[in-house]
Amino acid sequence: MEDLKKFLINEVLLFESDTLPADTEKRLQEIRRERTSKPVIFISSGTAGLIAGAGKTFQAAQAFIGDNEPGAEIVKVGCSGPANFEPFVCIQLPGKNKLFFRNITEDKVDTLLNGVFHNDINKDDLVGQQGGRGFELWPGIQFMDEISFFARQRRVVLNNCGCYDPESVEEYIARGGYKSYVKTIRHYTYEEVCNIIEQSGLRGRSGGGYPTGLKWKQALNTGSSSRFLICNAKESDPGAFTDRLMLESDPHRLIEGIAIAAYAIGASTAIIFFRRGSEHAYKRLKRAIESARDYGLIGHNIMSSGFNLDIIIRKEPGAFVCGEETALVSTLEGRRGMPQLKPPYPTTSGLYGKPTVINNVETLMNVPLIMQNGPEWFNSLGTEKSPGTKVFAVAGKGRMSGVVEVEMGTTVREILDDIADGIKEGKELKAVQLGGASGSFITGDSLDIPVDYDAMKEKGIGMGAGGFIIIDETTCMVDLVRHLMEFMHTESCGKCIPCREGTGRMLEILESVIRKP
């Protein structure tokens, strides 16, 4: 392992050219398992997969391999998004395209593996194949990007999810990870990094859509002896689970984004404000931080750049209101989590009165990609004023559910009809809810509105952090609103009268309506 570590640091991360030597690239292909001389079984092991039985699927695969194919390898990977397909299994034979199979519970494992290893494919659970240069095609099997769930997506932030072992820093580096970070801290000034992010047009993905580069500059230009970078990974909206998937499936990209952002604002301490209860994601993120530290990517004088960084995970106390940035800061300071009047904004006076930048998970996941590909590349995606992509957690009454990523400008109707594949059981749509408990219900012609911060703001619709809940004709909207109002009333911090008293009164009115015969 030490030889591999030295190779990845010296021959990859510290290699100045973007074009690697042929022998280096060949070895990276082996680490990525693009060149393999033995069968490899990839088992999705995110929360959705584990709930569906992926743990038992893994054990059954281990038992089969031990008895029948001892040379084969089994790899736990992250979740690629489609919750309906869990447990989701991918199999790659040497020299051939990957095959993907859905709903592979433990009782199906022996039949599946025995068939694939003998080139006898059972197509009942087959989803498709994914090709690569120089690999042999499986005849008569569709490609994954032709499936409706994936065809309409533009996977940029999620492109690693479900493709590698998220606990392996070696695999992440072999896939190009941390290269942008090392290049940034060795060759760019703070101001240059802020300018690149500002030129890209990246906007905060937590709902408000505030320009990320501008936020960073405000903190950088505020005189102070120290600054803080906070990643808001609380994701407290009901029905939202995008952050959890990204943390479980690609934690190293988040760490890289955090590290670049911290460098850009001159911060030596970064804090991940973590959602309590997401233990699987917490363990993976913690291991990822430990392995990044072991590789010298976190700590003192990182890669001889003179940059120091420590990353700390802090679990939130469990209150919905603590997701608001000033309440978040109050919590980290040991005070009650209550929103504060602004200004001052955290960028000028945040944690312990120091300039503090607070970005959410999805925002920071975009940063390494922008530094790698340039601001012009990011500007080429999406719309003029909302470039890039947006990740949504599609849930509710759609035929398909899971985490999806679409280019900005995609309409709500396209997500509903093309990716979610319409409504279950032939029911009629009643509404789509965006933005969580305090978000908006979209119906009728409003479904044609594009995923764009300004277009939605003009219509009074909040995009939110990523919740996309499909509601059909069987749902009583009054009962649903009562449920949401109960949530808002329970989670109110009680500081302001309109929220403390108003939500309670509205809840009383809604309950009286429901109780009436």
Image (cartoon, helix red, strand yellow):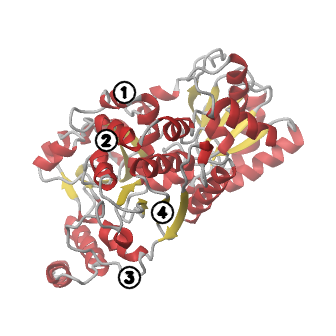
Work out how far the residue at label 3 is from the one at label 1, CA to CA, in angstroms.
42 Å
Q: Which residue is disc 1 drawn over?
A: 377
Where is residue 464? Give x, y as percent: 28, 55
Crowdedness near tag 3: few (<14), some (14–19) or many (≥20) residues, C-alpha within 10 Å: few
Q: Amino acid at mark 4?
A: Ile
Q: Label 4 to label 3, Cα distance in Å?
A: 17 Å
What residue does disc 2 label?
202
**Labels 2 and 4 touching (C-beta < 8 A):** no
Q: Mark 4 or mark 3, which has the lower sequence index?
A: 4
**Count of all numbered marks drawn on residues in the image:** 4
Q: CB of mark 3 within 8 Å of CB of mark 2? A: no
Q: Is residue 496 visible?
A: yes
| 114 sits left or right of 466 in the view | right
- Label 3 and label 2: CA atoms lie apart by 32 Å
> SS at mark 1?
helix
Q: Amino acid at mark 2?
A: Leu
* Residue under label 3: 335
Location of residue 479 by image quarter: bottom left
Q: Which mark is residue 271?
A: 4
Q: Residue at x 54, y 55 (%)?
A: 309
